[in-house]
Image: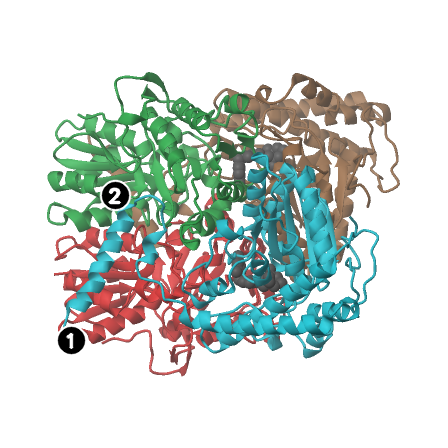
Chain colours: A red, B green, C cyan, D brown
Amino acid sequence: MTTTTEPSTGTTMSLSRALNTGLRAALADDPAVLVMGEDVGTLGGVFRVTDGLAAEFGSDRVMDTPLGEAGIVGTAVGMALRGLRPVCEIQFDGFVFPAFNQITTQLAHLSSRTRGAAHLPLVIRIPFGGGIGAAEHHGESPEAYFTHTPGLRVVACSTPADAHTMIRQAVACPDPVVFFEPKQLYWERGPVDTDLGSAPAMDRAVVVREGSDATLLAYGPTVRTCLDAAEADEERSLEVIDLRSLNPLDTATVAASVARTGGCVVVHEAPVFGGYGAEVAARVTEHCFDALRTPVRRVGGFCAPYPPSRLEHHYLPDLDRVLDAVDRTW
Amino acid sequence: MTTTTEPSTGTTMSLSRALNTGLRAALADDPAVLVMGEDVGTLGGVFRVTDGLAAEFGSDRVMDTPLGEAGIVGTAVGMALRGLRPVCEIQFDGFVFPAFNQITTQLAHLSSRTRGAAHLPLVIRIPFGGGIGAAEHHGESPEAYFTHTPGLRVVACSTPADAHTMIRQAVACPDPVVFFEPKQLYWERGPVDTDLGSAPAMDRAVVVREGSDATLLAYGPTVRTCLDAAEADEERSLEVIDLRSLNPLDTATVAASVARTGGCVVVHEAPVFGGYGAEVAARVTEHCFDALRTPVRRVGGFCAPYPPSRLEHHYLPDLDRVLDAVDRTW
Amino acid sequence: MSGAEGQPLRLLDAEGVYRDHPDLRADFDEAQIRGLYRDMAMVRRLDTECLALARQGELAVWTPLSGQEAAQVGSARSLLPGDMAFPTYRDHGVAWCRGVPPAALLAHFRGVAHSGWDPREYRLHPYSVVVGGHALHAVGYAMGAAAQGTADAAIAYLGDGAMSQGEVNEAFVWAAARRAPVVFVCQNNQWAISEPVERQSAVPLAERARGFGFPGVRVDGNDVLACRAVVRDALARARSGHGPTLVEAVTYRMGPHTSSDDPRRYRTAEEERVWLRRDPLARLRTHLSRTDTDPEKFLASVDEDCDALARELRHACRTLPDPRPGEIWEHVYAQTHPLVAEERGWYADYLDSFEETP
Amino acid sequence: MSGAEGQPLRLLDAEGVYRDHPDLRADFDEAQIRGLYRDMAMVRRLDTECLALARQGELAVWTPLSGQEAAQVGSARSLLPGDMAFPTYRDHGVAWCRGVPPAALLAHFRGVAHSGWDPREYRLHPYSVVVGGHALHAVGYAMGAAAQGTADAAIAYLGDGAMSQGEVNEAFVWAAARRAPVVFVCQNNQWAISEPVERQSAVPLAERARGFGFPGVRVDGNDVLACRAVVRDALARARSGHGPTLVEAVTYRMGPHTSSDDPRRYRTAEEERVWLRRDPLARLRTHLSRTDTDPEKFLASVDEDCDALARELRHACRTLPDPRPGEIWEHVYAQTHPLVAEERGWYADYLDSFEETP
Ligand SMILES: Cc1ncc(C[n+]2csc(CCOP(=O)(O)OP(=O)(O)O)c2C)c(N)n1
Ligand SMILES: Cc1ncc(C[n+]2csc(CCOP(=O)(O)OP(=O)(O)O)c2C)c(N)n1
Ligand SMILES: [Mg+2]
Ligand SMILES: [Mg+2]
């Protein structure tokens, strides 16, 4: 079992804290970096990801903004055009849509529109996913809206170690990055290595558990689900890949695994129909058609808005549904 | 060769005119129906789809709105809640994003949110697709953003006959419908039967050309491309299906064809990555795995913003690229 | 009506003394005043009870309104039965006035449903979770009511933070352009979670309206009589075809943003104390105790009603049935949708397969 | 500064007679006035020429500015080199003043590139096709300039229609909240395609600003001197840390919305005639012919420059090279992106495969 994303050295901390220290390092490293969003300053963010940063770097570099997501992303685009490197926070997944025009028609297009003259090293952090018993619009998984938008890079972290390194890589990246953080795992603890040297590149998938009978593909909160499923399966040896980067997708790593195992299940919380898993399934099929025993199986949310929290355990893919899908790879 | 969508009876008119007569019928049939958007009144719409309707039904039922897409869709939602049946026009594909929050978090959710108490018989018409030599944001294909949103129905017409019947079916539908109109085909002429009786249901796919060697799946502007490709292919017998409804997808019709032909190509103008074709490919593979000779082939736009118009013929799938993909189904 | 800038309009001063105002007609009789007090007391109790239920884990979350009773009750009691209200997630006082059974409010917060009432029955839209998302609905609804030739109006509730959202400002554009019969009530409770209102606007929020071409009024949001009078007049104006009004009710969220929030992270105890002295209930109680024919008896009866309400809420909360899994798919579409049917069927079979395993 | 309501501020009256205005400092010397006239004449000619090229099919589309020269030139000539301008698709006069080579404007309209110039070089953002999409960028840019401790300002150009967009109003919120050094210039040219400005607002657009907490000024958009003075002062105000200003330049789009539009479908010839009499060029020419030391000679030299420009444009248009297919992928990302590389490679091979076939 490889654990490339969890180096043995380093301090243990929660995923939220790992992001916090990553952002702190980014702010300290480069005076052009700034953090902005609703309640990111004094409060330190509703998930405490920016806790203490305003006190340390001042309210101009860790900026509480007016309440408007278009305003956050739109002014951040303007600041990036002026040479800054803004890191925007969207408070919850379901509130990114007022910014959708800015993200889709402006942020994603400006490099092409200016033939590369405009650089947009801008990060949009989005806590995503369900399972925390929250109200409507606090448990959604909107990643597919962004992965289909050329000009954006889209990543998702699933461990404290990755959270720390990937947020720093995202801030350093010259392209716009939509950075998904698994809400459900904010308080999960794990080792963090603050030395970026050994970290895999941001756009690489990582085999987080080796196996030989089928490949489970996951990102964000479902990585944990898939690891649990693999652990629970006593009969079969399941490989688990944390995709980490959704756009670009590290097709090579994924295809190499599926070519070996002959079975593939892709798992996310977003509705299956038209979800990111469709792209993964189509692409894996394109690359591994002859190796596949059965079609790629997709496990995810249903064709329904995210339900009230008392129903979310039905809506969300869990260990059993993952294993049921694994069964269907034979 | 079946031509279910082109009844021999009926007048010949352009697709734009067919929509116009369909909207006129809808307005005449039900006083609750109203048409709203930018320039839909006095001007009759930039594509003349609403030409003459304001003169006939008055400026309260064919309403020129202020310039704001969130406002158009948001007030339309409010009107629908009050019992009206608004038909909104978004002037061009690339301008739907300011309304994205209203469409995604409000329109699509309100029925579920109210446990069915709120009815939202609301149509959003969007001219889409490229190939008309227009400027940035006037040639895009944003359908995948909507097909992934539960609560919305998404359809696309490709012939005058369908344009007429489908817009009337969409207006009559109790659910929100995102209605895509192929800009490139607005001036294509064809027969229109104003008697709805014989028309297929709005959510059915239609085999527009029968064939036995491979199945081409298309919607909107690419239906024409695929028909041309099938016509041009002298060696192989290609079946062409106009999907018409993207959500729901008429899986049965599609799967029946692919099970017979053993080869499948799905064609759209939107970027392939994360596009609607990914869902079609994944789903077809799930249903026809054993019948497929090769993976489903996807032909579409590239991983880049829609290019300046002098490059659009490279970006858009054409007859040659479709046939190249057909080659690769063996 | 005046009052977009400077001192908010007021009828009851901080000591609960009634003073006439040249711009406000305030002909409320004893029964009406009692009614307003009772409403405020009941929703305060509802609020306290639900916050407790949230802290006990019976509700997933609660959004307390304490401090904002006057703004909510004063405005919502001005609505006619045919009017439609579009609330935020904090407007339990509005829900109360629309007649929504208190237990029905719990559904959202316990997570058994997104919304617990039929909006057509109570003419109350579901709570708006996406800040500002409902402002345009109110405008459209009002446009529809006008188009149908009725005198129904719509009211949209907004927070101070919501005033920054593009859609809310678009709602102002539309309302003004179409002279829609809609009243916007902005409860400026000084905070949007941890952000003070100054972060959203450098000038009083009521001033926003004039730039869009309709009047804005600042009212003391802790004075239920002033809120009642101002919103009544604004609704009358709307009904008679004179278009929208923005009412800024200057008030204070006395509790946390939600049951999960800790206001000590961003505001001082001193500030909270200042506003505690402006408690809208205390103010009307003082007024009542001076002017009511039998205040003791009345207040005692209200206390009893509050206790009964609290009991009812606790019981309702604990007995609220969990939803069936099938509800996930039940109302996604009004008309048959094959994918929904397929998934629903599959999941039912899937669940059954567990039961079959011995 | 006054003038959000009522009569727009003006220095040159309709007859081209100069009249001092108490609120405006107008110390322009002959060279400056000549410069403004020359700019306006050149962009008018550029406009006529490009519309002709569009009608001949050489450009895919053209968005004529005729009638708006004074608003564009007057405002853009007030910018300092370090300032950044964010234009709409109609602001060729602004591009001209920023020094963008006229031929570079054609790229967008001929469809060979989305934008033909380097925004860093000319401090001119690409044309904004999504109405209002750039307003927030201007605010953010201004915030950035201020954060860096410079005195650079940003200017955002808007149409009357754009004033209805939520994002534009959000830009007002942000600019006010952060006191950003930004000036919003709204060219109220009376029409948003076929919709008259009354459909967007019942009150003068300049009034919008006050509700957000910053000044709005209405200026005669066909008076280049007034536009120059008003925008210069607004920029000075921004630079010195006093925050944003909204300038509404009241003007007229004398031509069609685009080369594909037919204004006769929605407005009267009479209206067009009224505004023709207010032609901004004619007005300054009258003034010049009264005040200039040698108007004839000056105007003749301008005519020559215009002719040269027209020739240059026609030539440039016809020789503009078509883009290579590879450009589709060239700047989607700044850093290597495997999917882009894969597609680009595939397509190159695919194209090659045709050439190989004999
Ligand atoms: C579009 C959107 N963005 C962010 C949030 C997260 N959020 C919930 S409440 C809130 C503050 C709202 O403040 P205000 O409008 O003043 O209302 P209040 O909570 O004070 O009643 C925020 C930022 C949200 N619900 N919706
Ligand atoms: C978001 C968006 N919606 C719609 C359009 C289509 N459109 C292009 S120009 C225009 C009118 C703009 O009017 P105005 O802001 O007054 O500018 P003008 O064209 O008069 O200069 C419209 C509706 C667009 N480009 N962007
Ligand atoms: Mg508030
Ligand atoms: Mg205009």
Are discs 1 and 2 both within one chain? Answer: no
Q: Residues within 10 Å of mark 1 (few under 14, many from 20)?
A: few
Work out whether B171 lies above or below A80: above
Residue neighbourhood size for the residue with mark 2, other residues' Cα within 10 Å, grouped as few (<14), some (14–19), many (≥20)? many
- Residue C347 at x, y = what percent? 24, 59
Tell me the residue at 72%/29% (across/down).
Answer: D38
Left or right: residue A257 compared with residue C216: left
* Position of residue C55 in the picture relative to residue C1 (left or right): left
Q: Secondary structure at mark 2?
A: strand
When the figure is inspected, residue D135 is found, relative to residue A43, above or below; the finding is above
Q: Nearer the viewer, residue D189 or B169?
A: B169
Marks 1/2 in contact by CB < 8 Å: the verdict is no
Tell me which residue sits at (22%, 76%) in the image. Answer: A1
Residue B298 is marked as 2
For image coordinates 73% across by 61% down, the residue present is C30
Local SS, label 1: loop
Q: Chain of mark 2?
A: B
Nearest to the observer: residue D312 or residue A86: A86
State which image quarter holds ligand 1.
Answer: bottom right
Quarter of the figure that contains the N terminus of chain B: top left
Of badges 1 and 2, nearer the viewer stands 1
Q: Chain of mark 1?
A: A
Residue with the mark numbered 1? A234
Residue A47: x and y in percent read 49, 71
Mark 2: amino acid? Arg
- The C terminus of chain B lies in quadrant: top left
Query: Is C63 situated left or right of A290 in this image?
Result: right
Q: Residue C294, image x and y in percent?
A: 74, 70
The amino acid type found where label 1 is placed reads: Glu
